[in-house]
Amino acid sequence: MLRRWSKVLSPISKFGSQSHLNFVKNVTRQSYAGVAPAPTIEDKPQSPAVNPHKMFWSKPCSLALPPDSTLRVEEPNYQGIKRFMLKLMLFYSKQSRSIRGANVVYHRIISQVDKPPIYEAFNLEKTFKTTFSLLVLHMWLCLRRLKQEGNEGVEFGQYLYEIYNHDVELRVSKAGVNLLLTKWMKELEKIFYGNIVAYDTAILPEAKPGDFSKVIWRNIFSEDGSSTEDDAASQSVQALARYARREESCMTLTDKEALFSGNFMFTSLKHENGRRKG
């Protein structure tokens, strides 16, 4: 599955700039309903020594935003004739509310995946592959939680996928891939399917203790799909595996209202980065 990376990334890179494309991709209808140029190592400021082993050991908790949070996104509460007209236009229908909620959820995912802290926390270079892989991981976290809400969650996941898929096409197109867009989207979708299945399998109760970290290595850190973990990256792989497992537990503790409205935030990685440097 992961050996497809070289076939997919090489042609895309020929169309884009010399930097890597910032990418996102999401969930399968069947299962559930240009990054900024990466600076070279020389361009990056020297950071204090870090210890990933100290990260993400805290107890899971709900990711829901408090009622007074300025980061919350509330449904518009129009009154009078404006509300009446919007009702006629189905603005307040269940479908419309779900689509607005899915847009907010998608924004939460992108806010976590597109910004520097996640790459700094896990010592990852911001490339097309890592951005894509991290997005798939966070989509898996959301869709896994949505499945717990039954058919309603599956339907919401479909809206989320459609929003995501549209954005993916725009991003790949901006990289210069137009004539071959459909082909590469299909290839990336196949990779997505494999990653989702691998995460689901590795987190099952009967899975071996090290299975999940092995999947994290293959899907995100490995350049060639090798199952042999690089000793130099071991602590970062384990830290990302702990992060993902903790976020999965946190998502389970996050209530339905917060989930469907998008009023939740993934764990702040700026906070973790500050702690690990201490």
Image: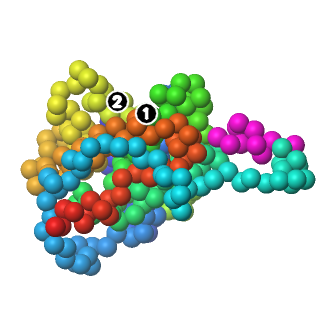
Q: Which image quadrant is residue 268 in?
A: bottom left
Q: Secondary structure at mark 1?
A: helix
Q: How many marks?
A: 2
The quarter of the picture where the C terminus appears is bottom left
Mark 2, residue position:
200
Q: Residue at x 36, y 48 (%)?
A: 133
In the picture, measured across the screen, residue 166 lies left or right of residue 45, that is: right
Answer whether residue 44 is visible to the viewer in this image: yes
Identify which residue, 18 or 242, lies in the foreground: 242
Q: Say which amino acid is labelled 1.
A: Arg
Which stretch appears magenta? 88-98
In the picture, measured across the screen, residue 58 lies left or right of residue 169, that is: left
From this viewpoint, which residue is outermost toward the left? Answer: 231
Identify which residue, 143 or 161, lies in the foreground: 143
Q: Residue at x 50, y 62 (%)?
A: 175
Q: Residue at x 58, y 45 (%)?
A: 261
Q: Position of residue 71 (x, y in %)?
A: 52, 60
Q: Position of residue 244 (x, y in %)?
A: 31, 43
Mark 1, residue position:
144
Q: Say which amino acid is labelled 2.
A: Asp
In the picture, measured across the screen, residue 158 lies left or right of residue 42, that is: right
Tag 2 near tag 1, CB within 8 Å = yes
